[in-house]
Image: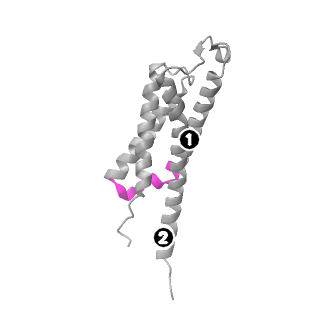
Amino acid sequence: MPGSYEPFPTSLVWLHYLSLFTSITIAVTSLFDYGTLSFYMNPITGLLTIFFHVPLIFLAHNRPGTKGMISIEAAVLACLLSLGWLACFIVMVLISKGSLGTVDPFGLNETISTYAVSITQRLQFIGTPLEFGLLGDIAIRSTWARRAAFYDDCEEKVYTP
């Protein structure tokens, strides 16, 4: 029907909520050690991820006809944020791998502890790859949902002479 709309896949909405919760958790726990384990990348990427999810969740609940969660922009941003979380994890591994107890990254006179002993640093090590996987899954599922909606629209417009 031309005037109706398909609701979003429920799994996609819940993945956005779970990713929002995970990114808030990582951003807050990384502030306890001033973000030094990830060389200040976790708080920044966490805030970018929060700014990504909040408008999409708002649109999904208040204006479901706009289909913001399955737009190409949402899929591309989710993919880019997923790569950002992967970069955060790689930086965390490289910093924690230091053998002398402290690392001076890039000659910036910044001494960073190289071992993850506190609970906040362990939560960051668990949450960062989880967020990478969640955002990658959101990107893939939104692409699948967009393609399914496109093919459904094409099937409705079959013209017979």
Compared to 70, does 150 lie above or below? below
Which label is found at residue 152?
2
In the rendered view, does 58 fall on the left or right side of 128?
left
User: Which quarter of the rendering shows the N terminus?
Assistant: bottom left
Confirm whether the magenta stretch covers residue 9. Answer: no
What is the residue that sits farthest to the top in this orientation? Answer: 109
111 or 69, which is in the foreground? 111
Residue 108 percent across, percent down from the top left: 63, 14
Q: Which amino acid type is shown beneath numbered disc 1? A: Ser
User: Does 19 appear above or below 5?
Assistant: above
Q: Which mark is residue 82?
A: 1
Q: What stretch of residues is rendered in magenta?
A: 63-74
**Type of amino acid at the residue the image marks with label 2:** Asp
Q: Residue visible at 54% across and 19% down?
A: 36
Q: Percent from the top left, x then y, of residue 161?
A: 51, 89
Q: Is residue 21 above or below residue 105?
A: below
Q: Are marks 2 and 1 in contact (CB under 8 Å)?
A: no
- Magenta portion: prevailing SS class: helix
Coloring scheme of the render?
Answer: one colour
Q: Nearer the viewer, mark 2 or mark 1?
A: 1
Q: Position of residue 129 (x, y in %)?
A: 55, 37
Residue furthest to the bottom: 161
Q: Residues within 10 Å of mark 2 (few under 14, many from 20)?
A: few
